[in-house]
Image (cartoon, grey):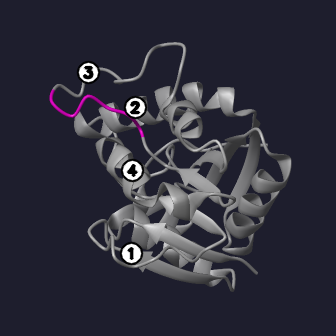
Amino acid sequence: MAHISIIGSGNMGQAISAVAARGGNTVELLDIGDADKRVTGDIVVLAVPYPAVGDIISKRGDQLAGKIVVDITNPLNFETFDSLTVPADSSAAAEIAAKLPSSRVVKAFNTTFAATLASGAVGPLTTTVPVAGDDADAKATLIGVVTSGGLKAIDAGSLKRAREMEALGFLQISLAAGEKISWTGGFGIVG
């Protein structure tokens, strides 16, 4: 079993915590303002809005060295909700990986809503979490956490695939914000 630190105690942090705990993993859930509490997990989930990531890295970068760091962000323009804030040939995950060269960065959970993680279902389908990263062991470890918690996971390839995952997450958020789908819905993957 894994020991997981989740930075961010909002809906996504709580939902990921519940999934990990169902799988028998130990979880510490830290508020974004808990900068005085040391991160102790072997896996660290950044369950915060993308604009908060830079501050977390500047304050906790040394604590993240050698760890699996899970980026769940969608780098939305929060003022307009009409675009992503990273260059078209990059991703939030790539930018995080560049700032944390001693960490094993993976992208996951950004294409699911908290409600589908908590319920374990997207309509009649089991919730599936795509996982992208350049470290095969880090991906396998996170996939094990996801599947032990009762969800499905799929290896989405290298960290370069984070760009497409973020575009898909942006589309899903746009549809929900435009009331075309509910915040309890989402995309399902059938194998």
Relative height, residue 3 to residue 76 (above, below): below
Select label 2 or label 1 by which is in front.
1
Residue 95 placement, left or right of 102: left
Q: Are marks 2 and 1 in contact (CB under 8 Å)?
A: no
Alpha carbons under labels 3 and 4: distance apart:
28 Å
Query: Relative to the observer, which residue lies in front, 190 or 173?
Result: 173
Residue at position x 84%, y 47% from top? 136
Mark positioned earlier in the residue sequence (4 or 1): 1
Residue 156 appears in which quarter of the rendering? top right
Relative height, residue 147 to residue 3 (above, below): above
Q: Which residue matches tag 3?
A: 82
Select label 4 or label 1 by which is in front.
4
Query: Relative to the observer, which residue lies in front, 170 or 71?
Result: 71
Q: Which residue matches tag 1?
A: 30
Q: How many marks?
A: 4
Alpha carbons under labels 4 and 2: distance apart:
26 Å
Circle 1: residue type: Leu
Q: Are marks 2 and 3 in contact (CB under 8 Å)?
A: no
Alpha carbons under labels 3 and 1: distance apart:
30 Å
Q: Which residues are magenta?
A: 74-79
Mark positioned earlier in the residue sequence (3 or 1): 1
Mark positioned earlier in the residue sequence (2 or 3): 3
